[in-house]
Image (cartoon, rainbow, N blue to C red):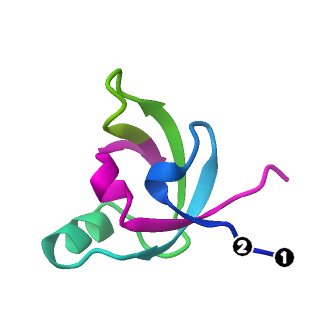
Amino acid sequence: MKRELIPLNRLPLGRAAKVWCLTNDGNTRRRMMDIGLIKDTQIEAIQKSPSGDPTAYFIRGAVIALRSDEASRIIVEALTGE
């Protein structure tokens, strides 16, 4: 089975994924890990702002807004609707 690895900012609304890896470093990486973005964490894109950026994501029972440039550094594995 082929994995569909994409940057989080390309995850369509309503679609779920699992975190594969973080490509950022330093304080930004620490912040992402502090909000629970570690390998295998499930995440769902739920809503875009009217301007299209940021996007709201459902992560570990909380809604977190991430800008596209931040989300582009989070690689996820898209989950199929099995």
Q: Nearer the viewer, residue 28 or 51?
A: 51
Residue 43 marker: none
| Tags 1 and 2 touching, CB below 8 Å | yes
Q: Position of residue 70 (x, y in %)?
A: 29, 57
Q: What segment carries the magenta color?
A: 57-82
Above or below, 28 against 53 in this view is below
Type of residue at label 2?
Answer: Arg
Location of residue 49 by image quarter: top left
Is residue 76 toward the left or the right of residue 4 in the image? left
Label 2 sits on residue: 3
Residue 73 magenta-highlighted: yes
Q: Residue at x 56, y 37 (%)?
A: 13
Label 1 sits on residue: 1
Q: Residue furthest left?
A: 27
- Answer whether residue 60 is visible to the viewer in this image: no
The residue carrying pointer 2 sits among few (fewer than 14), some (14 to 19) or many (20 or more) residues within 10 Å by Cα, namely few
Q: Nearer the viewer, residue 1 or 34?
A: 1
Type of residue at label 1?
Answer: Met
Secondary structure beneath dot 1 equals loop
Q: Residue at x 22, y 73 (%)?
A: 30
Q: Position of residue 27 (x, y in %)?
A: 14, 72
Above or below, 56 against 59 in this view is above
Q: Residue furthest top?
A: 50
- Answer whether residue 76 is visible to the viewer in this image: yes
Is residue 3 toward the left or the right of residue 12 in the image? right
